[in-house]
Amino acid sequence: MRSIRGRLEPHRRARALLALLALAATAPACSDELPAPIPSAGPEGAAPRRGGVLDVATFGDVRASLDPANIADGLAPQIAEQLFAGLIDYDKDGAIQPDLAERWVVADEGKTYRFFLRPGVRFHDGEELTADDVKRSVERALHGSAPNPAATSFSMIVGFDELQEKKAETLPGVEVEGRYVVSFHLKKRDATFLPILATLPLRPVCKSAGARYSDAWHPCGAGPFKLLPDGWHRGHDLTVVRHEGYFRPGLPRLDAVRWTFHENPTSQTFKFIRGDLDVLRDFVTPELLRFQADPRWKPFADFDGGGQILGEAMNVEMPPFDNVEIRRAVAAAIDRETLRRVRASNLAATNQLVPPGVFGHDADLVGQRFDLGAALEHMRRAGYPYDPATKTGGWPHVIPYLVYKQGLQEFMGQVLAQQLERIGLRIEIRIVNYPTFLALRARKMTSPFGPGFWMQDYPDALSFLEPMFHSKVISDEGTNNWSFYRNPRFDELVDRAHEELDDVRRKKLYTEAQEILTDDAPWAFTENVRIFTQRQGYVREHYTHPMWMHDVTRTWLDRAAGPVAGRAIFSEKGLAALLGTDRRGPRDASARGRGAGVGQ
Amino acid sequence: MRPAALIASARSMVGRLAQTAFGREAGGARLRASGSARAGLVLVGLLIAFAVLGPLVAPNDPYTSDFARGVTPEHLPVGPSRDFWLGTDRLFRDVFARLATGARISLVIGVGATAIATVVGSVVGVLAGWYEGRWVDTLLMRVVDVGLAFPFLLIVMALGAALERTTASTIFLTLGFTGWLGVARIVRSKTLQVRSLDYVLAARALGQSTPRVLLRHVLPNVSGPVVVIATILVAQMILAESVLSYLGAGIAPPAPTWGHMLFEGQDYLGAAPWITIAPGVAILLSVLGFNLLGEGLRDALDPRKT
């Protein structure tokens, strides 16, 4: 201030201030219409072309590892999926399909799964993949020395406990029955086995991985893309290049896929508009709304289900939520359609726990619904009647509502407070950081109320029902059952569903379990999160994926070359010549695809 | 000291303070002639008027979302209009109403925290200066040194995080009890000058007690810099509160603090810039106002300009 004052006389300072205010006042006029998408070069139905680098960015990062035996980051699965093929996998609709295994049979009353591998499948290092590799990879991932956060999901395999506790060095539950035949033996029937096997942890890894986990190992699998030694600049970017020995002929079509980390959504949007990114998934809300409203961009966009549920988790052991009528009042008082408008671009109101697209979602379930009259009646039954006209009555104390900073829930919580005030429940928002939030919500008798959220581990209702509400997961610290909810009947239904292999009967059990949750209301289920993906017009056969976000195995780029487009589609030779020339990776056509040779 | 004498002494001290700070003829004239001071006074006056009258004239409740009128068909906040003078925010609440309520919060916290910081800092500074070189001085100044070695906002954020719940009271107490360090330093150095002046020596020679000398002769004569510091400190406190709220360590939402309004609007800077501009300009003008006023006071009270 002093230095400015020394330079400017008072009248000049006043002018400078006025200029600043005028600039601020005119800022609204600066917003602009979106430019059109960059079109494809060829007509619809043109033959796919090989080549090119798909550029994507994310505000996240992979901090831990891409080793299937240690997938701990939210972003890691979408990259690891490109590197490691599994015996089975999910297709873009979330259905389980054969992958490295041509087929499988179920025997021994559902306790044995026998997989028949494709012959001739090559790892990234050129070695052939056999049943021995499958067994070695499974034992490596489930041994007690591996930091595998998902290991206990496979506790149904015979011999798991001994391997985890390092009392055994082999897993009798995985049996090699031939060069291309491997069987899994389970302790008992388990409906979650296939859905969980289709996830990442047990995917076959190259022989270089050895028999036991090591942090020093360079990721190597049999997926459509491979990671070259200099392909990952930690904290910055990662490039995977085409695995020329991939078992599906002609695939993948892209030369490479490059992720840039720590890119904030606003700069991602600018880069996407400019043509420096091919696909955009991270948005700030106003920009997202602009894309969604623009008819020129709509043909190149879609939502994926996301498999996420948002809600309000009520601790049934703490007042006032130890009173089921109060919980029912909360569930009925929330106007989900209004709440959705806090982020209309991504939220869809829901009445139940299991999101659409996940097996067990029941479109006919009545579920929890907004009914202010019913909510007031529940308050009366709870012994705390509230009169909206005089604004008297209700729960006499303020209820702490714990949220974490910079989360969507911080904003939804403010609208929730307005809605619950209408039935005489006054909440007070308390903001903490994310780790503290997680710790407090998961600690017994600590936090009565707060936002709840859960994302599927696999697209089946059990991925929600069991970890979120089964009494067996309750512990004094670190439980995922944030409501500390116990219901023997609910537990029994979930346990039965766990062993029920018949889809029709299992779905019926799921519906019955959801009806119990609707009535007991340990959560008020409110919204599903839908992930919006926007592509440039020249990005062909790119699919959003319910598990892996991007399905790029068939993706190809049909972008016109030339200076206007900014980037050409590279020949393998040209790409290889340019790779590694610039750590950051240049933005123009002449320099995309740094970091790795192609087809090596 | 008897109560009556104490009251008389206090009254005399206040009178001397006022005289020292504002009553000198030349100083008063300089204050009136100073463009900075006039501009600062106008801005501070406008801020006070806005804080007092704004919430009374605001057409909407600052805490209630208006999902009918406050939102566009594209699900964006509406811009400035007759219904919403400064538009609505990302939760479709009236920005003007929130800005006015936020002005009260900023002013109360700024002035309240400054009052605490000034009182504590003055007491510590006078005691340290008076007992220069003795253990009281050493102890107090080492505390100040340690305190000044830590980034101010870091201390405040740590305290804010340690408190289970942050309210306006906890924030201004936190700011007040961490903001006195600079005041203590300056008051100490001024006390060192004053304590060796003739009239102080004369008072001591006449047998006046130390508290009486400090209250009647020292404190009034160090009050000039204190007034200047306090005025500028209000601006710093407003800014600190805004930073804390922006970072999430301030008063929890839905309280409409300016810092939190900035945070809530940042994602909408392109589509609804009024959400950010309104609190941004408010913070700018408030801080500018108190700083200009402080500078004007400093010039007016500067003995070198007599």
Image: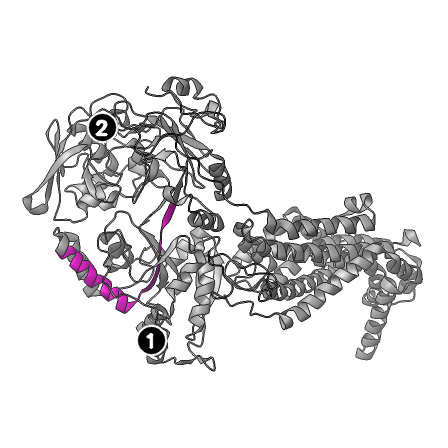
Corner quadrant of residue A119: top left
- Magenta part of the protein: which range? A505-532
- Answer with left or right where residue A2 lies relative to residue B253: right
Residue B246 at x, y percent in the picture: 57, 54
Colour basis: one colour
Q: Amino acid at mark 1?
A: Ala
Residue A413 at x, y percent in the picture: 45, 62
According to the image, label 1 marks what residue?
Answer: A374
Chain of residue at mark 2: A
Residue B277 at x, y percent in the picture: 62, 54
According to the image, label 2 marks what residue?
Answer: A248
Corner quadrant of residue A526: bottom left
- Answer with left or right where residue A38 lies relative to residue B35: left
Q: B148 above or below B252?
A: above
**For mark 2, does the 10 Å Cα neighbourhood hold few (<14), some (14 to 19), or many (20 or more) residues?**
some
Judge by depth and name the residue closer to the eye, A84 or B117.
Answer: A84
Q: Amino acid at mark 2?
A: Arg
Q: Considering only order in the chain, which callout, 1 or 2, is on the residue closer to the N terminus?
A: 2
Corner quadrant of residue A486: bottom left
**For mark 1, does the 10 Å Cα neighbourhood hold few (<14), some (14 to 19), or many (20 or more) residues?**
some
Q: Residue at x 78, y 44 (%)?
A: A3
Local SS, label 2: loop
Q: A506 above or below B84?
A: above
Q: In the image, is residue B298 part of the stretch drawn in magenta?
A: no
Judge by depth and name the residue closer to the eye, A472 or B56.
Answer: B56
Judge whether residue A114 can be spotted in this image.
no
Chain of residue at mark 1: A
Q: In the image, is residue A506 part of the stretch drawn in magenta?
A: yes
Residue A64 at x, y percent in the picture: 38, 37
